[in-house]
């Protein structure tokens, strides 16, 4: 499984990644993309349109129901496989990408060169 932190992608990078995902056979069987809210980030919205499935993550007491419903309409109800509701006990802070287990390779952050060259991927 490949984890890609795509929360800080520029639109041009998201377009390159979207094209790569949509037109190629990935070198990994499963890829998980962490994205910002597609309602606020065009890069994230572009990626939700080319992946096989979307798992929503909402914050209890923070995410407004009408925004979640709008997002479901935008992405398509049939493409959403579930929703995780998180209760935040402290202020949100950016999480670091998970470290690979000993003997594994480090999980890279996305760079357009990585997508084109196939470097930094694993097939586990």
Image: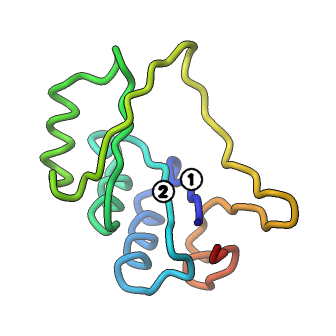
Q: Dot 2: within a 10 Å radius of its alpha carbon, few (fewer than 14), some, or many (20 or more) residues?
A: some
x 56%, y 72%: residue: 112
Task: Name the outermost residue toward the right.
Answer: 103
Task: Count how many numbered circles sit on residues in the image.
Answer: 2
Query: What coloring was used for the rendering?
Result: rainbow
Q: Which residue is mark 1?
A: 5
Q: Quadrant of residue 96?
A: top right
Q: Is residue 13 left or right of residue 124?
A: left
Mark 2 residue element: strand
Is residue 113 or residue 28 the one in the foreground?
A: 28
In percent of width and height, residue 31 lies at 50, 65
Is residue 39 or residue 30 the one in the foreground?
A: 30
Q: Quadrant of the N terminus?
A: bottom right
In percent of width and height, residue 104 lies at 80, 66
x 20%, y 53%: residue: 75
N-term-proximal mark, 1 vs 2: 1
Q: Which mark is residue 33?
A: 2
Q: Quadrant of residue 89?
A: top right
**Inter-mark Cα distance, 1 to 2:** 6 Å
x 35%, y 78%: residue: 22
Q: Is residue 9 left or right of residue 22?
A: right
Q: Quadrant of the C terminus?
A: bottom right
Is residue 29 or residue 73 the one in the foreground?
A: 29
Q: Which mark is residue 111?
A: none
x 36%, y 85%: residue: 23
In percent of width and height, residue 118 lies at 62, 83
């Amino acid at each position: 499984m490949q984890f890609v932190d795509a929360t800080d992608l520029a639109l041009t990078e998201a377009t390159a990644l979207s094209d790569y995902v949509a037109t190629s056979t990935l070198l990994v069987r499963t890829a998980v993309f962490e994205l910002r809210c597609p309602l606020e980030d065009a890069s994230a919205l572009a990626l939700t349109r080319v992946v096989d499935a979307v798992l929503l993550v909402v914050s209890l007491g923070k995410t407004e129901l009408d925004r979640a419903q709008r997002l479901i309409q935008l992405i398509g109800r049939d493409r959403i496989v579930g929703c995780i509701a998180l209760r935040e006990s402290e202020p949100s802070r950016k999480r670091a990408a998970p470290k690979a287990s000993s003997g594994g390779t480090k999980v890279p952050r996305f760079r357009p060169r990585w997508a084109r060259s196939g470097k930094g991927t694993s097939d586990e």
